[in-house]
Image (tube, rainbow, N blue to C red):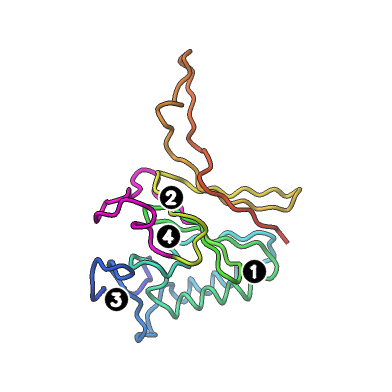
Amino acid sequence: RYSRSPFLKSNAPGARGKEAYMPDLHDTGKQMLSPTQWSWLEDQLEEKANVRIIVSSIQVLSDAHGFECWRMIPTERERLTKLIRDKAMPNSATVLISGDRHVGGIYETEEGLIEITASSWTHTIPFGAYNDCNSVQSCDEADAIRLGDLVRSNNFGSVDIDWESRALTIALRMADGTAAYRYHETGDQKTDAGTVLQKHSYSIP
């Protein structure tokens, strides 16, 4: 974040896909990471690994919204995804983890690059927060690479690795327990927090 160039402000604030920012297609000198950060990442991807988990504070893959995301600096996103395709994906299960959307989602490109966006733990955006939309169809941005609807209940993400079966499972899980499940009649604490809301599994090479 501290090496990131300023994003280009939207010329139509609030419009779908341009809510706050829009991709800067002309200034190719902008950076998301510093040269030192790029060098470090490249060195890490040279290391042998069966599973790679790459964390970004903002979304990497989505093209469907105008909030903070890697899409806003296209040259940097292409550099990142090419680096992952060339160095990580050929020999490891690679997952991107991101947040800062206040909704959750799981994404997968045609090339098999996977991203799980988990947020928010406490303040997920409900239907109708900023306009009069009241359903998945009217509120969720259309996104060809998202696997399922956006998760609009408070959530957290998990990555489970089963080395015996060579499987990696990513999931969005309920952060809050619902009142009906919170306690037994005996008073013992019980909660359904952690219940899986969405999940997808992948093979580990």
Q: CA distance from mark 4 to mark 2?
A: 18 Å
Q: Nearer the viewer, residue 71 or 111?
A: 111
Q: Secondary structure at mark 2?
A: loop
Determine whether, in the image, residue 23 is placed left or right of residue 191.
left
Q: Residue furthest top?
A: 186
Residue 54 in sight = no
Earlier residue among tags 2 and 1 = 1
Earlier residue among tags 1 and 3 = 3
Label 1 Cα neighbours within 10 Å, binned few <14 / some 14-19 / many ≥20: many
Q: Which residues are magenta?
A: 116-142
Whether 40 is drawn above or below 129: the answer is below
Image depth: mark 3 or mark 4 in front: 3
Q: CA distance from mark 1 to mark 3?
A: 31 Å
Label 4–label 2 contact, CB within 8 A: no
Earlier residue among tags 3 and 4 = 3
Label 2 Cα neighbours within 10 Å, binned few <14 / some 14-19 / many ≥20: many
- For the point 26% across and 73% down, the residue is 10
Image depth: mark 4 or mark 2 in front: 2
Q: Secondary structure at mark 4?
A: loop
Which residue in the protein does label 2 denote?
Answer: 151
Q: CA distance from mark 2 to mark 1?
A: 27 Å
**For residue 8, which numbered disc appears in the image?**
3
Q: Quadrant of the N terminus?
A: bottom left
Query: Amino acid type of disc 2?
Result: Val
Which residue in the protein does label 4 denote?
Answer: 57
Query: Amino acid type of disc 4?
Result: Ser
**For residue 89, which numbered disc appears in the image?**
1
Query: Amino acid type of disc 3?
Result: Leu
